[in-house]
């Protein structure tokens, strides 16, 4: 794992956006994996700014989102399809036919996961996958006890995640308790992963992911097996790590190497 510790959340968003722009500049028809949640929003704003300044074009990019609520169609304001259109796709020149979000209103949810896997494979696999992390260590909607080899499928949300997300739903609104999500095996098969986390509410999840044992109780810890995982966090999210000086030293060395 490459651990990048930055001063604040704005720097985290900016660094994430730079890595995605670099990927798209190097390979304009990149297949990118995207995420929802509050953490990626600032990175999407940074990407939109870069697009508006002519630094990046998304015209040949294909995207795959991690997950979607089961039972919400893409027009529902709390659906992740709606979120992506609103926060990113409507503001950049990506071809909407090339944007994919798991189908939350599929009439055949038990086979929708395999269909999504097939779509990813048909596009040649994901070059770079953006991730957030839940307070319980989930990535996508892979909650604790998820199989570390899982593929895209239906997952039951934990009470913690339902409570965390309840703020987005009004009292009388249907809040889904099931999701369709890429699996941990799907995520670990991507060619690169960029995980963003900010704030002290994520500090324990980050410690378990980076320094804990690989365990289904911390789904993100499976990224220790990913050959190219970049973890970008602020000081607050890094606050429980025991080896921060080492990670900062390694990153300095890495930056020096890149300049040579
Ligand atoms: P958050 O969610 O960015 O809203 O904290 C992250 C996640 O649950 O993956």
Image (cartoon, helix red, strand yellow):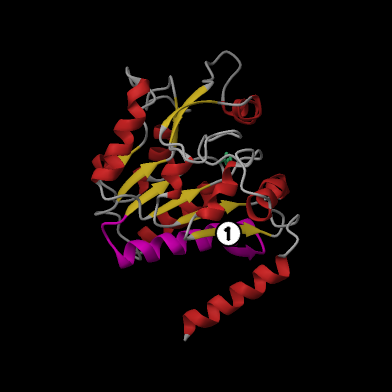
Q: Main secondary structure of the magenta part?
A: helix
Q: Could you say where residue 12 lies in the image, as x and y percent from the top left?
A: 57, 59
Identify the residue at image location x=70%, y=57%. Answer: 238
The reply to whether the magenta stretch includes residue 27 is yes
48, above or below 148, in the image: below
Q: Which quadrant of the render holds ligand 1?
A: top right
Image quarter where the N terminus lies is bottom right
Q: Which residue is mark 1?
A: 232
Q: Nearer the viewer, residue 228 or 57?
A: 228
Measured as percent of width and height from the top left, residue 246 is found at 69, 71
Residue 44, horizontal then vertical, whole percent: 46, 51
Near-viewer residue (41 or 176): 176
Per the rendered image, the range of residues in magenta is 1-30
Q: Whole-percent x and y of residue 130?
A: 46, 50
Above/below status of 227 relative to 92: below
85 within the magenta span:
no
């Amino acid at each position: 794992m490459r651990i990048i510790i930055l001063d604040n959340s704005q720097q985290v968003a900016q660094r994430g956006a730079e890595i995605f722009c670099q990927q798209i500049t190097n390979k304009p028809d990149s297949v990118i994996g995207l995420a929802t949640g509050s953490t990626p929003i600032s990175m999407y704003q940074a990407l939109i700014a870069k697009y508006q300044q002519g630094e990046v074009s998304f015209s040949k990019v294909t995207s795959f989102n991690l997950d979607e609520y089961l039972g919400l169609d893409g027009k529902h304001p709390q659906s992740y399809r709606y979120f992506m259109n609103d926060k990113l796709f409507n503001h950049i020149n990506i071809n909407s036919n090339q944007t994919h979000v798991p189908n939350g209103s599929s009439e055949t949810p038990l086979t929708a996961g395999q269909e999504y896997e097939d779509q990813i494979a048909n596009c040649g696999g994901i070059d770079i996958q953006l991730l957030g992390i839940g307070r319980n260590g989930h990535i996508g909607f892979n909650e604790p006890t998820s199989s570390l080899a899982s593929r895209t499928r239906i997952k039951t949300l934990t009470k913690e995640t339902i409570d965390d997300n309840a703020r987005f739903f009004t009292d009388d609104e249907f809040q889904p308790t099931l999701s369709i999500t890429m699996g941990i095996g799907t995520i670990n098969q991507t060619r690169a992963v960029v995980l963003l986390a900010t704030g002290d509410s994520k500090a324990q999840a980050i410690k378990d992911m980076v320094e804990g044992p690989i365990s289904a109780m911390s789904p993100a810890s499976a990224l220790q097996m990913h050959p190219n995982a970049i973890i970008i966090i602020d000081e607050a999210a890094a606050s429980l790590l025991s080896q921060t000086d080492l990670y900062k030293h390694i990153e300095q060395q890495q930056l020096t190497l890149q300049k040579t």
